[in-house]
């Protein structure tokens, strides 16, 4: 079985279990590869926020064999499947176990875990939630100078400046949103450029109930 086929089979199983959205799995896989291209050089470690069915986390793990990765999700069922997927990863010469791990729980709580807080030069998010929720839940994991990379909708569905307002991002300790695009694939990169306040993130559910800003355009990332 080829590397691409084994990953594709895992993602098809994820979709069968309801952990991956509708649409051709091969197209979703190709999209995740293009997102990875937009990120650029691999970091030493990354955290995939709301890993769900494994995108882009599984692709990042495959493409970056020297990077330590954490897949984070709040669902016990999805976490169990992600752990199974890591065990079944047959591509590449080195085992994933020990290099890629799954942490199950709410981001608002796990972002205060001493082993995870301010620990990652890169956090990724795909379809995690509205911009304000994604930014607040991710910022606690970012190391100083680290970047949050969020998959964005097509250009005709929203304005980056309205979706990611500078003033609100500064309150979280993040710099202005930087957009990167290639064809129909886009990401927003938010870099942590100042000290992290102990205020962030707020208690479980509060980022969604009382977001720091209201969505403009599409409410959720892709």
Image: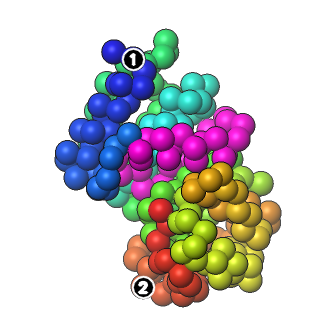
Q: In the image shown, does 10 or 168 lie closer to the viewer? A: 10
Q: How many marks?
A: 2
Residue 112: x and y, percent? 53, 60
Check disc 2 and report the residue beneath it.
209
Left/right of residue 100 with respect to residue 76 in the rendered view: right
How crowded pointer 2 is (Cα within 10 Å; few <14, some 14-19, many 20+) is rated as few
Above or below for 149 versus 207: above
Is residue 218 something one can see in this rendering? yes
Q: Which residues are magenta?
A: 27-54
Q: Residue at x 67, y 36 (%)?
A: 42
Residue visible at 32% across and 39% down in the picture: 11
Coloring scheme used: rainbow
Which quadrant holds residue 91? top left
Q: Horizontal placement of 101 versus 186: left or right?
A: left
Residue 162: image quadrant is bottom right
Q: Which mark is residue 132?
A: none
| Magenta-colored stretch includes residue 32 | yes
* Real-space CA distance between mark 2 and mark 1, rounded to the nearest whole angstrom: 45 Å
170, above or below 214, in the image: above
Q: Which residue is identified by label 1?
A: 2
Asked if residue 117 shows in the view, the reply is no
Q: Using the image as rendered, state which of residue 199 and residue 139 is in the foreground.
A: 139
Residue 55 point in image, percent of width and height: 43, 46
SS at badge 1: loop
Does 89 sit left or right of 31 as displayed?
Answer: left
Q: Pinpoint residue 56: horizontal percent, then vertical percent.
A: 48, 45
Residue that appears at 77% across and 54% down: 145
Q: Is residue 40 magenta?
A: yes
Q: In front: 39, or 67?
A: 39
Quadrant for the N terminus in the image: top left
Residue 80: % across, % down: 26, 42
């Amino acid at each position: 079985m080829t590397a691409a086929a084994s990953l594709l089979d895992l993602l098809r199983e994820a979709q069968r279990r309801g952990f991956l959205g509708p649409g051709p799995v091969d197209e979703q896989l190709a999209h995740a590869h293009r997102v990875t291209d937009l990120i650029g050089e691999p970091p030493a470690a990354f955290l995939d926020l709301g890993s769900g069915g494994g995108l882009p986390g599984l692709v990042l793990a495959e493409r970056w064999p020297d990077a330590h990765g954490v897949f984070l999700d709040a669902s016990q069922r999805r976490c169990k499947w992600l752990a199974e997927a890591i065990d079944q990863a047959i591509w590449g010469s080195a085992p994933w176990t020990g290099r890629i791990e799954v942490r199950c729980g709410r981001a608002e709580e796990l972002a205060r875990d001493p082993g995870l807080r301010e620990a990652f030069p890169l956090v990724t998010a795909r379809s995690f939630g509205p911009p304000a929720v994604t930014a607040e839940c991710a910022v606690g994991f970012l190391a100083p100078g680290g970047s949050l990379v969020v998959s964005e909708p097509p250009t005709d569905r929203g304005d980056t400046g309205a979706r990611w307002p500078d003033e609100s991002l500064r309150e979280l300790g993040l710099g202005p949103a930087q957009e990167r695009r290639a064809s129909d694939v886009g990401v927003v990169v938010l870099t942590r450029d100042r000290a992290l306040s102990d205020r962030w993130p707020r208690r479980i559910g509060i980022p969604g109930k009382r977001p720091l800003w209201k969505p403009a355009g599409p409410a959720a990332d892709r």
